[in-house]
Image (spheres, helix red, strand yellow):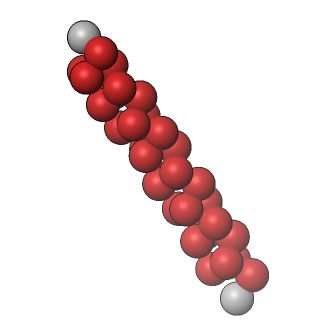
């Protein structure tokens, strides 16, 4: 059970990192 929760947390962290990259790219495109 704990392993599943840890894996889920890791997946959530990856998603948040991807969202940050997408947001930063979007800002760069809008500014460029």
27 up-or-down from 6: above or below: above
Residue nearer the viewer, 22 or 1 = 22
Q: Residue at x 35, y 26 (%)?
A: 27
Q: Quarter-wise, where is residue 2 in the image? A: bottom right
In the displayed structure image, the side of residue 2 where residue 19 appears, left or right: left
Q: Residue at x 47, y 54 (%)?
A: 15
Residue nearer the viewer, 24 or 4 = 24
In the displayed structure image, the side of residue 2 where residue 29 appears, left or right: left
3 up-or-down from 31: above or below: below
Q: Quarter-wise, where is residue 5 in the image? A: bottom right
In the displayed structure image, the side of residue 6 where residue 17 appears, left or right: left
Q: Which quadrant of the rendered structure holds the C terminus?
A: top left
Callout count: 0
Furthest residue toward bottom: 1
Give x and y (percent) for residue 26. Answer: 30, 31
Residue nearer the viewer, 10 or 32 = 32
Q: Residue at x 63, y 80 (%)?
A: 4
Furthest residue toward top: 32
Give x and y (percent) for residue 31. Answer: 30, 15
Furthest residue toward front: 31
Give x and y (percent) for residue 23. Answer: 39, 37
Q: Quarter-wise, where is residue 24 in the image? A: top left
Q: Residue at x 43, y 46 (%)?
A: 19
Q: Which quadrant of the rendered structure holds the N terminus?
A: bottom right
């Amino acid at each position: 059970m704990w392993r599943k929760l840890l894996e889920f947390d890791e997946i959530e962290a990856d998603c948040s990192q991807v969202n940050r990259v997408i947001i930063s790219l979007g800002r760069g495109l809008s500014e460029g």
